[in-house]
Image (cartoon, coloured by chain):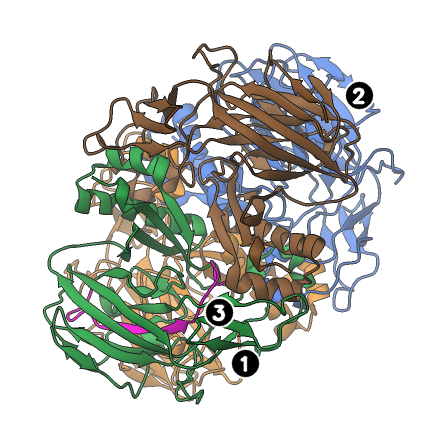
Chain colours: A orange, B blue, C brown, D green
Amino acid sequence: MATHDFEPTHFHVTIGSHEPVLRVASGDTIRTWCVDAAGNDRTGASITRGGNPQTGPFFIEDAKPGDTLAVHFDRLRPSRSRGVSGQVIAPQVVDPWFVRELPVRDPSGDWWTLDLERGTARLQEPPEGLEHLELQLDPMLGCFGVAPARGEAISTATSAQHGGNMDYRGFREGVTVFLPVFADGALLHVGDGHALQGDGEIVGTGIEVSMDVELTVEVIASKEIGWPRGENDEFVFAVGNARPLDQAVQHATTELLRLLEQDYGLDYRAGSALLGQCIRYDVGNVFDPAYTMVAKVEKGLLP
Amino acid sequence: MATHDFEPTHFHVTIGSHEPVLRVASGDTIRTWCVDAAGNDRTGASITRGGNPQTGPFFIEDAKPGDTLAVHFDRLRPSRSRGVSGQVIAPQVVDPWFVRELPVRDPSGDWWTLDLERGTARLQEPPEGLEHLELQLDPMLGCFGVAPARGEAISTATSAQHGGNMDYRGFREGVTVFLPVFADGALLHVGDGHALQGDGEIVGTGIEVSMDVELTVEVIASKEIGWPRGENDEFVFAVGNARPLDQAVQHATTELLRLLEQDYGLDYRAGSALLGQCIRYDVGNVFDPAYTMVAKVEKGLLP
Amino acid sequence: MATHDFEPTHFHVTIGSHEPVLRVASGDTIRTWCVDAAGNDRTGASITRGGNPQTGPFFIEDAKPGDTLAVHFDRLRPSRSRGVSGQVIAPQVVDPWFVRELPVRDPSGDWWTLDLERGTARLQEPPEGLEHLELQLDPMLGCFGVAPARGEAISTATSAQHGGNMDYRGFREGVTVFLPVFADGALLHVGDGHALQGDGEIVGTGIEVSMDVELTVEVIASKEIGWPRGENDEFVFAVGNARPLDQAVQHATTELLRLLEQDYGLDYRAGSALLGQCIRYDVGNVFDPAYTMVAKVEKGLLP
Amino acid sequence: MATHDFEPTHFHVTIGSHEPVLRVASGDTIRTWCVDAAGNDRTGASITRGGNPQTGPFFIEDAKPGDTLAVHFDRLRPSRSRGVSGQVIAPQVVDPWFVRELPVRDPSGDWWTLDLERGTARLQEPPEGLEHLELQLDPMLGCFGVAPARGEAISTATSAQHGGNMDYRGFREGVTVFLPVFADGALLHVGDGHALQGDGEIVGTGIEVSMDVELTVEVIASKEIGWPRGENDEFVFAVGNARPLDQAVQHATTELLRLLEQDYGLDYRAGSALLGQCIRYDVGNVFDPAYTMVAKVEKGLLP
C-alpha cells in the first residue's frame, strides 16, 4: 500500500502500450499531476502539444488481460486559478439549419477565474446577461484509460472500451472507476482535467485546467468486464462510448445488466424489471468522435 | 377561471384535429381522467382499444396557430391500485449481439400493487432478488399534445413538435408544459398515465395505470415556440423528439438556446457560454419510434 | 380492366383516410396528373398549396387491411418543359463544421429547361463550369402511398410503412410497387413528380415538375407485407423509411429477407447466404424527416 | 519505376507507424500477397492471427504529411480456390425485434469453391433453394490504408480517414485510390481480400480469400485531402467512414464537394447543382465499427 509521488516529464496523445513511467503494486496510491487539454501546466506554460495529453502510463503489477482495474479517484484538484472553455456550442449539437445562426467562435476561448478556496468560477469577460454568473467547481477528469487490446494506440480525442475521452461529469473525486485490462500491467493513463463541465461537453470543453491527481489502484483478478464501470456513494454505473448516442445507450445498458448479474446476482429477467422502472441515464459527451452515455441505478435498490 | 369536470366517453389513438369534446377559456381548469395505455379504466375494465388512448381534445378559446399553450399539471394521481409494466428490456436498447441473451417476454407483463396512501409500488410476483423492492410513486403523463400542423393526425405511439408519446419522467404534477399551437383551439389531448417510470422507458412501459388529471390551461398569444418546453421549481427545459437520439439532442439544445433568448434575453453567445458549463440532459424515452431528449438549465443561474 | 381518366380538382398534403375521389376495381388503370411539389400545374400556375400535394385518394374495390396493393407505373411523363431544383446541398448532408462554407441558398431555386422530345434537361442559368451540362430525363414519383393504419394522416413531407415521400429514383415508369393495405379501399395517393433526381435528394428536390401519370392497380388478397416493395425487369426490392439511415437499412434488409421467403421460398438461412454476397443498396433520400434505403437483389439469382 | 516483389513474413492487425518492410519510390510497383482475413495463406495454412492481418507497411520515399498517396490496384487475384463467408446476416443489419428470428450462425461459415479460370464461385453446401447459385468473382480488398495521424495504431476491424476496413466492393482491380498522408513514407498496409462481396458486407464477410496483389504507388506532393478518394473508368468518388451511416454520408458528400473544387474547379454552388441531380451513393459496409458510404459522380458530367 505504498504511495508514489510521480513528476511527469512527457505526455502521450494516444492511449496505448507505451513505455511505463512507473510501476506500482495493486493497492498502491499514485500522487501526480496533469497538464490541461492544451498542454499547459500549473503555471500556464505550454510544455507539451495539445489534445488531452496524458500522464503515464502506470504499470500495475499483476494486472493481466481478463482482469479488471479499479481506480479510486482519491483527490482531483485544479492546480491553478485560471481555466478556459470553448465559446460556442458545437455545430453537431444543434439543428443543421441552425448552425449558421450560431456566433462565430473565437478560438482563444472564454477565460474563467477559479477561486480555489471558495470553490467557484467566474467568467473574466462575461457576455451580457452573465455578469452575475458564479459557478460551483466540480473537478473531474475528462480523459483517462488503459492500453486497448490488439496493440491499438487510440487518440485521446476519442473513447472506446478502454476508456479514453469520455468527458463525463461523474468522474469526480470519490468515485471508483473499473476498467477492463487488455495489456499486462493495464497501463493507466490520466489527463484532461476540468474544473467543471456541463452535460455533453457541448462547447467542446469543460473549464480546462491543470490538475493535481491522487489515485489508488487495485487489480481485481479474473473479473472480465466489457466497458468502463463506476461506483459512488449513491449509484453503480456502466459507460458506453460510441456514435450515435443510441449505440452508446446500447453499450451502457447491456453493461449495466451484466454488472447486476456479476455483482448482485440478478439475472437478466430481474435486471430488466429493476432497470425498466429505475434506470437513470447521464449524458457524458456529445462532442467527441465517440459519444458517451452512462447507465446507472441506485445502490439502495439493489439486493 | 372556471373549473370544468369532464367525463370522457371515447378516446383517440392519434393526436389530430378531432372534434373537440369540451371548450374552455384561457385560465380555466379541467378535471378529468384517462384510461391506461391499454385502454383500461379505474376498475380495470377494457373500455377502448389500446395504444395510449387520449382523453380530449379540449378546445381552448382564442388559441391560434403561432401562439403557445401553457398547461399546468395541477394534479396527476393514479386512480387504481394495480399497474402493469413490460418485463424485458427492448431489443433496440441493448447491443444487437446481446438480444438473444435476453429472456423471452411474457406479454401479460409484470403487475404491481400500488399503495396510493403510502405512495409506493411493489411487484406482485417479483423475480428472484427483487423481493425487497419497494419503489416510490412518481406519477406522470407519458403521452399528451396538441393537434399538429397541416392537418396531420399522428399516432399516439410516437412524438414530434406537437408533443405526443414523449414518456418523460419530468412530466409530473407541478410542472408547466408549453406547447406550440398549430390549430385553432390548440386541441389538447392527454393520456398514458404512469405511476412511475425509469429513464428511457426501456421496457416499453412505465407502471401503466389509469389516472385522475387536473390541468390548468393558458394561452400565450403570439409567442411562437418550436418544440415542447417546460418549467418546474428548479429548471426550465426544452424537449426534442426524433431518432437517432443525437437528433433529439439537436432539437432540444437548439430550442433551449431559443428559450434563453426569448424569455431571458440571452443571445446565442451568452447562451452558449452558460449552457456549455451548465446544461443538463434528461433522457425521455429510447423506446418509441421517436426518442425524447430534454435539455435543461437551473433557473437560479439565469439573469 | 377499365381505364379511368381522372381530373383532380383538389389535393392533399397528408396521406390519410380522406374522402375517395374515384373508385376503381382491381386490374383497372387510372390516367391522371399531378401538380409539382409546390402546387403548380402544367401551365406553371399555382393551383394548390405546396408540400407535395397529392392527387387522390383512389379507392380500390375489395382492398382490405392485410392485403397488398400492386401499383404498376405504366407511364410517368413530365407535363411541362420547365422544372426547378434546390440550389444548395442541405446542411444535414454535409459535415456540421462545413455548413458555414456552403453558399447561401436562393429560395427561388435553379430552373431547368426540359426538352421532352429529346428527353434532356439543361440549367437555364448554369453556375460557372456547368455550361455544358445536359442531363438525361429519368422521370419518377417522389411521394405516393396508401392510407396508414390507425387513422393516421401523415404529412407528405415524410414517409413510413404506407409509403409517402420516399424520393427514390427507382420509382420510375415500368416499375411495379407493392404497398401494404391498412384501410378499406387502400386509398392510393400520388404526387411529387421529378423529371430526374440524384441519389439522396440532397438539395431537397429533384427537378420538380408536374406529371402525367398512368397507373394500373391490382389487389393481392391476404398477402401481408411490412414495407413498400417493388419489382422491375432486373431486381426485386424492399424499402425502409426511418432515421438514422442505419434504421432504414434494418427495415429494408428485414423486409427483403421476408420477401425472399414469401415469394421465393428461401428461408432466412438461405436468404442470408444469398444476400450476404449479392445484396445491393440504393439510397432513396437523406433529406426528408425519414430517410429511405432500398435493399434489392437481382431476379436472375433467384430460384 | 521499379517493380518490387515482396514476400511477407509477418502481418499487422493495426494500421499504424510500424517498422516498414520495404522502401519504394513514387511511381514504383509492388507485387506481393495477402493472407485472408483469418490469417490463412494460399495453401489454407494458418500463418498469423486473424482479424484482417495486413501486409506491409510499405514506405514510399518522399511521401510527407500533407501529401496524397495514389495507389493504383493493377492486379487483385484470389490465390486459392476456396473461400469462406459468414452464414447469417448480422443482428445490427436487421430490425431489433427480428434478431431472434434469424438462424443461429455456425462459426465455421459457408465454404465456396472458386473457379479461378471461369471466374465463378459456388457454395460447397448450398442451403435449399440455392443449389443453382453461381456467382461471378469480383475480387477486391476489404482493408488497406496508411498510418494515421498523431501516432495512432488503429485496429484493422475499423476504418477512418486513413482508410482501414472499409469493405467497399468498388476497391477492385483497375481503380486508383487516393489516401491522405499523415506520416513520413505514408506507410501503406494492404490485406483482407474478398473474391466478391455484397453491398454492406452484411454477413460480416465477403468470400474471404488469400490474394495476390500488384499495386503502383505515386506521391502527389502538397495535395491535402480529408478522406480516401478514388477513380475508375466511369466515376470519381469520395469515401466516408463513421457511424451512423448518416455521418458517413456527411463525410463522403463533403469530401466529394471538395474533390470537385480541387480537381475540377467547381465551387460549392456549382458542385451543389451538379451533385443535387447526379450524385450516386454506394454502401461500403454496415457491419464494421465504422460504416462506409461512397459518394460518386460520373466523370462524363464533369467540365
| Range covered by the magenta-colored residues | D182-201
Q: Which residue is mark 3?
A: D205
Q: Chain of mark 2?
A: B
In what element is the residue under mark 1?
loop
Residue D302 picture location, percent across and down? 24, 41
Q: Which residue lies under the disc numbered 2? A: B6
Quadrant in which the C terminus of chain B appears: top left
Left or right: residue A229 compared with residue D216: right
Local packing at callout 1 (Cα closer than 10 Å; few below 14, some 14-19, many 20+) is some
Name the one closer to the observer, C231 or A117: C231
Figure quadrant of residue B77: top right
Question: CB atoms at circles 2 and 3 under 8 Å apart?
Answer: no
Q: Percent position (x, y) of residue D224?
A: 17, 54
- C7 vs A234, nearest the viewer: C7
Q: CA separation, marks 3 and 1?
A: 32 Å
Element at label 2:
loop
- The vertical placement of D204 against D78, above or below, is above
Q: Residue A211's quadrant in the figure?
A: bottom left
